[in-house]
Image: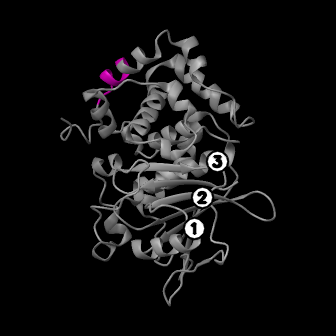
Amino acid sequence: MLEVSALADGDGFGHQETAGMTPAHTRRPKLAAMLAATGWLGFAAAGCESIRGGAIVPNPSADPAVAAIPAPQQVKRPAKHWLRVSQYVMYSDTPLDANDTLFREIAELPDRIQTELHLPTGESLVQVFLFDTQEKYEAYMSGRYPRLPSRRAYFISEPRGSGGDDLLVYTFMGEHLRVDLRHELTHATLHGVLKGVPLWLDEGLAGFFELPPNQDGVNPTHLDTLRRGPFQPDLARLEKLGQVRQMEKPEYREAWAWVHLMLRGNPASKTILLDYVQALRTNPNPGPLLPQLKTALTDPNAILADHLAKTEFPAIARGKAP
């Protein structure tokens, strides 16, 4: 089975669009310059998509390392330079500086996920391909994976002939690189140690860990939107969603909200979540989480609303929050 997770452009959250994006030829920042763009709006703008069930397959006529595109040239995956960062191997056609802030952040991500969720250290390597420009990235993806919608980053778990999966992340060097990598590498890290993750939980966890540690999992845009309402949470409905196209902005916000409640709001619900994640290590389908949550929380919806009302905006965002 091919598993795919992707970051949508803008605040897409499951719909296909590239409108409003700056043309790539006008924004080809060097890595060091790009790392300076750490405003909280960059965290809030990202949406994620996951596609499962084997419906998405690579172009059978494409070489694994070369995408056939409707043009005389061929775009190859970046391979001139590489850098090992924790369990991730970064490939780029631009020299990579191991001392860059980005790579120090990425190196800490597996420990952060494992400590937070009480998971063992993953042994699977994740290959990360950083294209120099958006044009090269899109040309490669459209040739190698022609059925995938346009997104600015993808995680792909691709079965290899010898058994096991190749864990691959594709993206390009742009202003959203920090959040994109954290989001997709969260999917990859979870995939390396769990048998499966329900769609809503996979996206809720990625939405939590895509944020820098000093945000403590708080997405300012999600929090502001949910507070202003109307918001009627329905975890039972959320848990039934199996196709990413069933998820729109409200579903992504709700997935993040439930995860943040369980990890930061209520100790009893955190225990429920951690036990559930442990079950996913051996069972890809342990059933819905809501019935277990109701044993710990008398009224989960009311407790979620109270948690959102009391959650503080991150210090970096307070000056911009309504």
Q: Closer to the observer: label 1 or label 3?
A: 1
Which residue corresponds to mark 1? Answer: 145
Magenta-drawn stretch contains 131: no
Residue at the right extreme of this rendering: 162
Distance from Cα at disc 1 to Cα at disc 2: 10 Å
Residue at disc 1, secondary structure: loop
Q: Residue at x 50, y 90 (%)?
A: 72
| Secondary structure character of the magenta stretch overall | helix
User: Quarter of the image containing the N terminus?
Assistant: bottom right
Residue 218 is left or right of residue 267, and the answer is: left
Distance from Cα at disc 3 to Cα at disc 2: 10 Å
Nearer to us in this view, 257 or 87: 257
Which residue corresponds to mark 2? Answer: 156
Tell me if residue 69 comes above or below residue 169 in the rendering: below
Q: Amino acid at mark 1?
A: Tyr
**Quick one: label 1, few (<14), some, or many (20+) residues within 10 Å?**
some
The magenta stretch is 306-312
Q: Residue at x 36, y 39 (%)?
A: 215
Q: Closer to the observer: label 3 or label 2?
A: 2
